[in-house]
Amino acid sequence: MLKLTYFVISLPMTSLQLNKTYEPQAVEARWGQYWIDRGYFGAAADSTGQPYTIVIPPPNVTGSLHIGHALNNTLQDILIRWRRMQGRNTLWLPGTDHAGIATQNVIERQLLEEGIPPAQLGRDAFIERVWSWKQQAGNTILEQLKRLGASCDWSRLRFTMDKGLSEAVREAFVRLHQEGLIYRGDRLINWCPRCLTALSDIEVEHEPIRGTMYHISYPLTDDPCTSLIIATTRPETLLGDTAVAVHPEDPRYNQHIGKFIKLPLTNRAIPIVGDSILVDREFGTGAVKITPAHDFNDFEAGERHQLPRIALLTHQALVNPDTIRDAGVEPGVLDSIANLPVTKARPIIVEALKHQGFLTKVEDHQMVLGKCYRCKTVVEPFLSPQWFIKIQPLADPAIAAVEQGHIRIIPEEWSNNYLGWMRGIKDWCISRQIWWGHRIPAWYCTTCYPEAHKILEGRGSRLIPSHASPIVSKTAPTTCATCRQGQFIQDPDVLDTWFSSALWPFSTLGWPANTKDLETYYPTSTLVTGLDILFFWVARMIMIGLKFTGKPPFRDVYIHALVRDAEGKKMSKSKGNVIDPLTKMSQYGTDALRFTLASMASPGRDIKLSEDQIEGYRNFANKIWNAARFILMNADGPSEICPVSDRPFVDQWVLSRLNHVTNAVTGRLEEYRFDQAAGQLYQYIWHEYCDWYLELIKPVLQNGDSPAARSTRATLLQTFEHLQRLLHPFMPFLTEEIWQTIPHQGESLVRQPFPVATQEWENAKAEQTFTIIEQIVTTVRTGRALLDYAPSKSLTIWGTAKDPDAIAQLNESRHHIAHLCRGTVSIADQNDWPTDRILHLAVGSLMIGMTLEGEVDLNKALARIKKHTQTKQKEAARLHGRLASPNFAAKAAPDVIQESKERLDILTAELSLFSSSEQQLQKMAF
RNA sequence: GGGCGGAUAGCUCAGUUGGGAGAGCGCUGCCCUUACAAGGCAGAGGCCGCAGGUUCGAGCCCUGUUCCGCCUACCA
């Protein structure tokens, strides 16, 4: 007994109506707040379902949403909404970053505009000022994220400087210090003379410039007639040279190792050393000056040879008269350059060298210059006491985690990038001489280190000698263990912003406390980020996460492309090439922008965004909108869900295809192929569902309450509801609006189950029959077009086939063909076809003819047919050649051979029909 | 200097293990066919950067090369 389940869907009473044109603003305003008010995005650690966690890459608290954020957060939202619908216990944790130097610069600029030098304001007042600015501007980006539809659990909003996270930072610092992984030392660091702070290696941008190479002669002390010629791009640093290096195996120079040379413009003699690491015999003259206080290589060479360091410049990159006097610089030279900026001192030194006959050659030289990533000022290597993290012990497990697959980087190509960087990693300079940030939890006893008194509040850490050993503690100490006194000054430096960011995946979940949240949601599932912060952030989260939790902070790292402008340049305000996502959202709708970004998120490739594309997807949204209107107009009637096998073939076909798309979308999302998932939806909804299904069922629906109409009405609503769920992660606002309007069960689409494929919807036969309809209809339409035969004019289609199954399929679909072709269909033996005014067309193994009424343009048709014939003949010839080749027969796979044969058969049949059409047309023409 | 990626239709790009060159936008023609003109139907347009190689067969694999982009780097 066949069990039939019948039930009638009734339309709900709804106040919602769909206007003729899709107006996104109204729709977005309605649902964005609705979702939040009802708490649909809230996560609870005790919920059922396998946890799925994403922590947001926290945007700068005072920032504004740019297109990169839009992409980044759209992708995260797609993942989270999808997983939420799948029934996972989802948490998307939102938050903002205090962004040390960036924010400090913003406030400093504001103050300068008001005519207040920041130094005059003082540290505490300055910080207060930043907090009040945060109060005022900090919500901007959060509101913008909400507008984008970001389904974060907004009740869990965190900030890198809030109480809990600040505590986590101090905890992490103290623990690392206890283990000897944080140290303070005199090192050469990248120094920005404008920001007056240290920068980490990756905060320095390199820019190629055309510089000058100066060749300078250094005479030997015991043989002034012999000189070593050294080449340098920074002649002024010669005043701080403490040795000259040559390669120990260089026969030109190695006899001089151990001798001394007289340093030009000074009264100093400096040694010649052999150093195979520093010196490349092939480059320049083969002799290198060593200036340990002003060059990173020289610093290391200085360590190897125990050379003194002479710092020539102040922290503002001015020539320091005190130190160069001590370095024995000739009084005349000294006076001429004292207190000058380094760039002004250089030509004076060059002139002096030239005057005294030391300058032997000047030539152009391509070189790179390091600049501050924030303010673009030329960075100076600067010798000062700073805090560092000893990175090697942290890097090794972080390398292993990726190598062993505990962390998956997607696309995989970036793994090598990551591993390469991690293997060559150097100690991380974490101290910054600014005010805004987490202040380093280290205190100096003013009794033990009277120098500490001299600290200029705020930016004076370089005045505290590196041998001073501070008390590192989560809270201010009360008594000095050495002298029993109780006067302390806290280290004025703050931590690199990325230090707190490195803790983000677990500090936001309550660490160091062992919370239920931490237990449930950590390690997080997926980190979605751009390549630009792979080293800044991702690598450090992995190192620090492994260190403190013993677990990798996330399972997958999905790295998306950078959004660039039409010329492929990085978008930036200064270049004026930004596409503002908020403007586009207002113009085309948030869903259109989201869908555009998802569609373009191909892996490994930068996105060049153009406005036309957004418009195209706006049209897609409008298409769906109008499909919804059509469905609502036609849903108003009796409908019955019956077993798939009992439904009309068009319903079987559309369900079979929907099944396929459902599988495909899910599969593509599993692989993070947002572009392909979006493409599947676009193609199916527009070009199968709307173009074919809705057109095919129009006559069926008009047929009142016939069984076919009832079933189709039910199928229509069923599939369309299914599609809204499938599309929801990509276009949340539009789908919610539509879903709320069509028959549905539940409060919101947000919490509906994500569709899964149904085996019984699979129907190969229906798909095959559809293909026949599609081909015939397209062929007849093409026939109409090439004859300039108006669509309104009627015609008769004649069809036959050798295969009885094909005839049966033709018969089954004749009404659909008649409807879509606007004509009548006759199935008859070819002998019974009329001989006059008939155009023969080929559709695979079917033979089709169309008879027309009235006048037609035959010449055009003849030309077109000739062209088609040529194309087909070419293809047939190629296939024929391939099949005739003995090598092909011997080596190609059997199915490939079979396919080629079948295709050639079809081509041959088509060609014969073409030739018959051509003859017919010629007959008609005369 | 090292590494990575790209070069396919006028534009922006897709092309999964090698077997009939695709999409969107733009363009041309026809059509307001009662969901949609932000639409429908049909169409034009491509030595897949260049040169070799492997293969019965290459947009796809290999080598070389040109141009563009990105990352990285201590060549004084």
Image (spheres, rainbow, N blue to C red):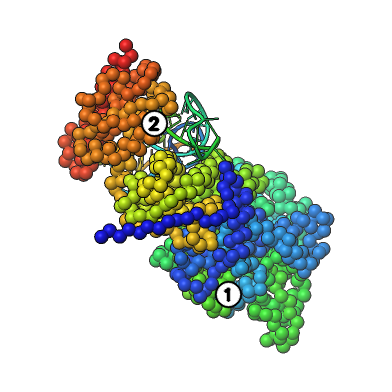
The quarter of the picture where the N terminus of chain A appears is bottom left
Q: Is residue A363 found left or right of A131 in the rendered image?
A: left
Residue on which the image places disc 1: A510
Sequence-first disc among 1 and 2: 1
Residue on which the image places disc 2: A822
Query: Camera-side residue: A404 or A322?
Result: A404
Q: Secondary structure at mark 1?
A: loop
Query: Camera-side residue: A759 or A457?
Result: A759
Q: Residue at x 56, y 67 (%)?
A: A42
Evaluate whether residue A57 shows in this view. Answer: no
Q: With respect to residue A844, does B73 lie above or below?
A: below
Circle 1 packing at 10 Å, graded few (<14), some (14-19), many (20+), is some
Q: Is residue A786 found left or right of A240 in the rendered image?
A: left
Amino acid tagged 1: Gly
Query: Camera-side residue: A557 or A267?
Result: A557
What is the chain identity of the residue bearing mark 1?
A
What is the chain identity of the residue bearing mark 2?
A
Query: Camera-side residue: A217 or A684?
Result: A684
User: Residue A79: x, y in percent?
Assistant: 49, 59
Circle 2 packing at 10 Å, graded few (<14), some (14-19), many (20+), is some
User: Residue A603: x, y in percent?
Assistant: 46, 51
* Residue farthest top in this picture: A926
How far is disc 1 from disc 2 in space, using C-alphas? 68 Å
Q: Residue at x 52, y 74 (%)?
A: A45
Q: Nearer the viewer, mark 1 or mark 2?
A: 2
User: Residue A447: x, y in percent?
Assistant: 75, 82
The quarter of the picture where the C terminus of chain A appears is top left
User: Residue A242: x, y in percent?
Assistant: 63, 61
